[in-house]
Image: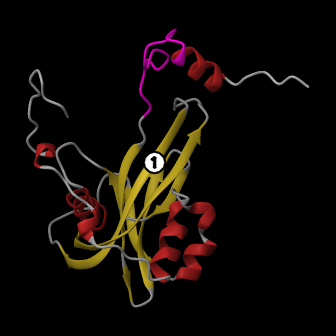
Amino acid sequence: MNAKPSFALIYVRQFLEGKLADNSVMTIRWKPSATVAAIIEQNGKFLLVEEHTPEGLRLNNPAGHLDESESLLEACAREALEETMHLFTPTHVLGVYMSRFQRPSHESCAAEDVTYLRFAFCGLLGALQAGRSLDTGIVRTLWLSPDEIRASAPHHRSPLIVQCMEDYLAGQRYPLSLLHTDPTVACPRTLTSGDTA
């Protein structure tokens, strides 16, 4: 039985034969969406947020996207503050996770296909910040037990909520020194000829 060669095999063969320039097939580079999440536990319960989504109300860890010019730690502290009104100080990296979200198009939304690269942190929950309000779309914060979180999985915004909780409960922790943010993130430098990134 003669199987057809895969696209990848054909591409590699043509590249090796000098028929293709590097990246000639890739016109747009795929990039995952970098996010951060605060995994916050106190007295056996975890702090989650309930938020509006196109699919209705969903539960999530305090989480969000990495913004330009901020470190992962800064992003996590910012997102926790915006979504819970509490200060949060990351003390450990819990893990780095990937998930994919697909939403078909419908009357008010275009189709989406997003791969998330989640950097999850555990740490210390600080004081409630008076005068703040919950971020747009966040309805409320709530403390749930591990069993309540497992039972509410059909209402989770991210499939990673349970995995992060289970990793936390198993004692998984990594030092923050695992991460490094180069100063060029906050103050980019311009490359000149002869420089390399």
Classify the position of the N terminus by image quarter.
top right
Residue of label 1: 116
The magenta segment: 16-30
Q: Quadrant of residue 48?
A: bottom left
Give the structural element (helix, strand or loop) at label 1: strand
User: Residue 172: x and y, percent?
Assistant: 43, 77
Classified by dominant secondary structure, the portion drawn in magenta counts as loop
User: Residue 195: x and y, percent?
Assistant: 13, 29
Q: Residue furthest bottom?
A: 43
User: Residue 180: x and y, percent?
Assistant: 21, 57
Q: Residue furthest front?
A: 17
User: Looking at the image, can residue 180 be seen?
Assistant: yes
Classify the position of the C terminus by image quarter.
top left
- Whether the magenta-drawn stretch holds residue 28 is answered as yes
Colour scheme shown: secondary structure
The three-letter amino acid code for the residue at tag 1 is: Tyr
Q: Is residue 34 left or right of residue 87?
A: right
Q: Residue at x 45, y 78 (%)?
A: 168
In the image, residue 18 sits, relative to residue 8, either above or below, namely above
Q: Residue furthest top?
A: 19
In the image, residue 133 sits, relative to residue 124, either above or below, namely above
Q: Nearer the viewer, residue 37 or 136?
A: 37
Q: Is residue 196 left or right of residue 63?
A: left
Q: Quadrant of residue 130?
A: bottom left
In the image, residue 118 sits, relative to residue 77, either above or below, namely above
* Count of all numbered marks drawn on residues in the image: 1
Q: Is residue 125 left or right of residue 49?
A: left
Q: Nearer the viewer, residue 32 or 194?
A: 194
Q: Residue at x 34, y 53 (%)?
A: 64
